[in-house]
Image: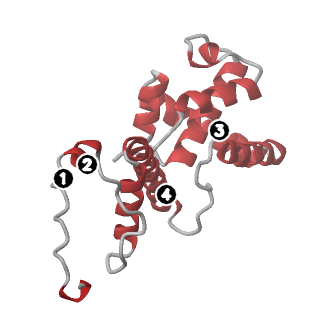
Amino acid sequence: MKPWMPFAELAALVAKRNALTPTALLGRRRNNRLVRARWELAWLCTRLSGESIASVARRMDRDHTTLLNGLARLRQCLRTDSDYAADLSKFEEEVADELLLPPADLGGLTASRRKLAGRVTAATTFMLDRIIAAMADDPLGTIARINRALDPEAPAYASRPARAEQLHHRPAPAAAAPSLNAV
């Protein structure tokens, strides 16, 4: 499963930060401002999602070697310009908060942990979509299934109402037999 990556939203945020349009950011023109913004987009995509550079390059309609070169040059800029490094780091945190992405600094083995966090986010989103769809069709049954999944030993907390077709085809209740004590 690929990690969830809101690429279009991320491109829009990077374009806004650099006073560009998303179309210009992903276009073919080359000037210093556009190129640096593309480096930032590639940097954020790889850092926040754990996606490979080749995958990000496909999304940006670029060759992966172009992105490798751009990321190497961006790293050099970050090493030499501490103000720019702090600014980009702050922007990365803001983007992660706005797009509800897992934090970029996950301790040791950050690349694998970031990849795992992206997969967990994607799986959670997928499961929530399934739960919402099931709730629309059968809310009480969905709640009962969730409760059984959480605690299989417990009784179902939400009873399932009888369906209309079941109500019409039930046999009539048997008449009560007269009691011997009734006389």
Q: Give the Cα separation between the discs numbered 1 and 4.
A: 51 Å
- Three-letter code for the amino acid on which mark 1 is drawn: Arg
Label 3 vs label 4: CA separation?
Answer: 25 Å
Q: Secondary structure at mark 1?
A: loop
User: Is residue 152 visible in the rendered structure shown here?
Assistant: yes
Amino acid type at image mark 2: Leu
The relative height of residue 164 versus residue 9 in the rendered view (above or below) is: below
Percent of width and height locating residue 46: 52, 43
- Confirm or deny contact between disc 1 and disc 2 (CB under 8 A): yes
Q: Residue at the spot x=40%, y=71% of the render?
A: 150
N-terminal of the pair, mark 2 or mark 3, is 3
Q: Which residue is mark 4?
A: 117
Report the disc number at residue 170: 1
> Which residue has dot 2 on it?
167
Question: What is the x, y in percent for residue 7?
Answer: 53, 32
Residue shown at the point (45%, 49%) measured from the top left:
128
- Identify the residue under disc 3: 74
Q: Quadrant of the C terminus?
A: bottom left
